[in-house]
Image (cartoon, rainbow, N blue to C red):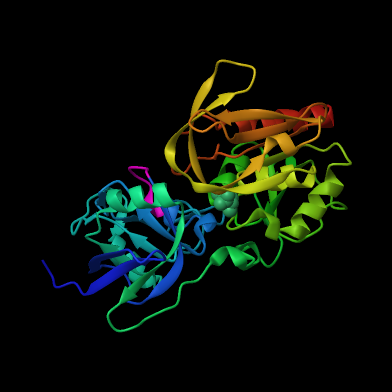
Amino acid sequence: MPDFKSIKLVLEDGTVFKGKSFGYHKSVAGEVVFNTAMTGYPESLTDPSYEGQILVSTYPLVGNYGVPNKERENGILKYFESDRIHVKGFVISDYSFEYSHWNARESLGEWLKEHKVPGIFGVDTRALTKILREKGTMLGKIETEEETVDFFDPNKENLVARVSTREKKTFGNGKYKIVLVDTGGKYNIIRCLLKRDTTVTVVPWDYDFNNDDYDGIMLANGPGDPQMCDATINNVSKALKGDKPIFGICLGNQLLGTAAGGTTYKLKYGHRAHNHPVIKVGTGTCYITSQNHGYVLDADSLNDEWEPLFININDNTNEGIRHKSKPFFSTQFHPEASSGPTDTEFLFDEFINLIKKWKGD
Ligand SMILES: NC(=O)CC[C@H](N)C(=O)O
């Protein structure tokens, strides 16, 4: 085994985990969050919602299937969720020094180095996760022996402005015109829309789309505290006066709820996994969903024009809302999955059906 440099993870409560460096060897600070999924590191690491966060994988074997090729389809990378790694650092237990997969082009360590993102292995990530579950999400830093850094809270910054597109971009050439408000949206939201006869115009987070020619609004996922997105919230409030269909995902659920007059709060340690069970309100139907969020909408804060659509069975928190008479709905989980179970992808069909109804098709 090659010689790996020493590096450590330090939590704000003083806990230290020593390990070895397998990514870019530098020190970074951020918010430490854990994900309990068994697969999906290429997708998670490039999910813009992780901007500013140090990600911990509870599943112990990581890197064994390498990192996929950088082929593009419809102008976007086919196997990643954005063009770069967004996590501040990656904390794992057992790094696979060898990888094997039909589509692998490089190792996880090589990819992290290319993007200048540190990785630490040799950490008991389950013991670490127990601490985060008991004390709640904490700030932390990955520190080399050569360089010290201060703790840093990414949620005090407007992370959405950092990850959003700077200019309007159009994808596809389908019948239904969708405005996708890019608060840090994952590429699979675009892919899921393009599969359904759409033209997707991706616009910056603070762009006022209300006077544009479109058939439906897609509110994407994104990093940080939803209350930082004042411009998006204002634009969505205006759209709520009209009756064109709106579909929100994750941050999109929180922004739709806030635009409707509701409030959000931070969970103790968030939902980040492939197996969160949610129940559709008013039915006995449960779906297993992919999730990645730290904040949540307080459904009780909404007025009676709105109703909860899904509820998390583990902790009874809100997993989606809908307007009682207009075609507006959203989910806290990720129907586009990537990575994760695709059981709820049908919600994209429901969005298109609302658009067809609105257009009289
Ligand atoms: N994936 C997301 O859209 C996350 C939304 C928000 N940043 C949260 O952590 O709750």
Question: On screen, 337 above or below 26?
Answer: above
In magenta, the rendered stretch is 36-42
- On screen, residue 103 above or below 283: below
Relative placement, left or right, of 358 versus 62 is right
The answer to which quarter of the image holds residue 331 is top right
Residue 45, position in %: x, y? 43, 57
- Determine the residue positioned at 53% across, 58% down: 48
Q: Farthest residue toward the top? A: 284
Q: Is residue 172 toward the left or the right of residue 211 in the image? A: left
Horizontally, is 102 left or right of 36 in the view? left
- Residue 312 at x, y = what percent? 54, 31
- The quadrant of the image that shows the C terminus is top right
The image position of residue 52, as x and y in percent, is 50, 64
Q: Could you tell me if residue 173 is visible in this image?
A: no
Q: Quadrant of residue 305?
A: top right
- As rendered, which of 71 and 130 lies closer to the eye? 130
Q: Is residue 191 visible?
A: yes
Q: How many marks?
A: 0
Q: Nearer the viewer, residue 18 or 248?
A: 18
- Image: 76 above or below 1: above
Residue most extreme to the left: 1
Q: Residue at x 79, y 26 (%)?
A: 324
Residue in the image at 28% along x and 50% along y: 127
Query: Residue at (30%, 59%) from the top-left corner?
Result: 105
User: Observer-nearest residue: 57 or 192?
Assistant: 57
Estimate the x, y position of residue 271 in percent, counting from the top left. 48, 43
**Is 174 above or below relative to 231?**
above
Screen quadrant of the N terminus: bottom left
Name of the residue lying farthest toward the bottom:
146
> Left or right: where does residue 311 sit relative to residue 227?
left
Magenta segment, principal secondary structure? loop
